[in-house]
Image (cartoon, helix red, strand yellow):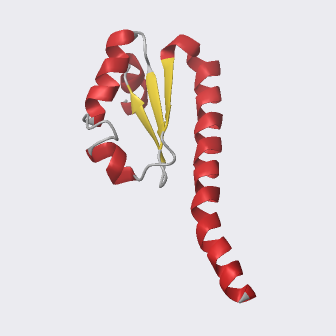
Amino acid sequence: MIDIVVLLAVILGLPICLMFYRTYQGTVIYNRAVKAFGKNNVVYFNRSYMTYNAFFDRNSSQLDCMSLYTNEIKKNPDVKIIITSVLQTTNYLVCDLEMLRKVSY
């Protein structure tokens, strides 16, 4: 009986630990980006409770995630980078053409 309880705790605990880790990872990256570009130029979406497909195909409010990004860029046209934490990974969306030129050349 104890083995089943331990197994159940491990099975339920792993996704929760992964959500906390993605939140931590996104927050660290966000803090570095804020130091580099300023608070007004960085946006952070913490969706660590969602899977990659759930966020990037459709988010929970039935909006395409690109419209979510577009709305952020419309609200603040000075945005240089958008950071998104989901269950599987942390993603970056670079919104500054000058930054892209520096990175790609």
Q: Position of residue 10 (x, y in %)?
A: 65, 73
- Residue furthest to the right in view is 2
Q: Is residue 41 left or right of residue 26?
A: left
Q: Nearer the viewer, residue 52 or 10?
A: 10
Q: Is residue 20 left or right of residue 43?
A: right
Look at 71% across and 87% down and name the residue there: 3
Look at 58% across and 14% down and name the residue there: 39
The quarter of the picture where residue 60 lies is top left
Using the image, determine if residue 25 lies above or below residue 40. below
Using the image, determine if residue 57 lies above or below residue 65. below
The quarter of the picture where residue 105 lies is top left
Q: Is residue 97 visible?
A: no
Q: Nearer the viewer, residue 3 or 101?
A: 3
The quarter of the picture where residue 63 lies is top left
Q: Position of residue 9 (x, y in %)?
A: 67, 72
- Residue furthest to the front in view is 1
Q: Is residue 68 visible?
A: yes
Using the image, determine if residue 69 lies above or below residue 39. below
Look at 44% across and 28% down and name the residue there: 82
Using the image, determine if residue 32 lies above or below residue 85. above
Look at 44% across and 49% down and name the residue there: 50
Q: Position of residue 33 (x, y in %)?
A: 58, 25
How many numbered tags mark residues here?
0
Q: Quadrant of the N terminus?
A: bottom right
Q: Position of residue 84 (x, y in %)?
A: 46, 37
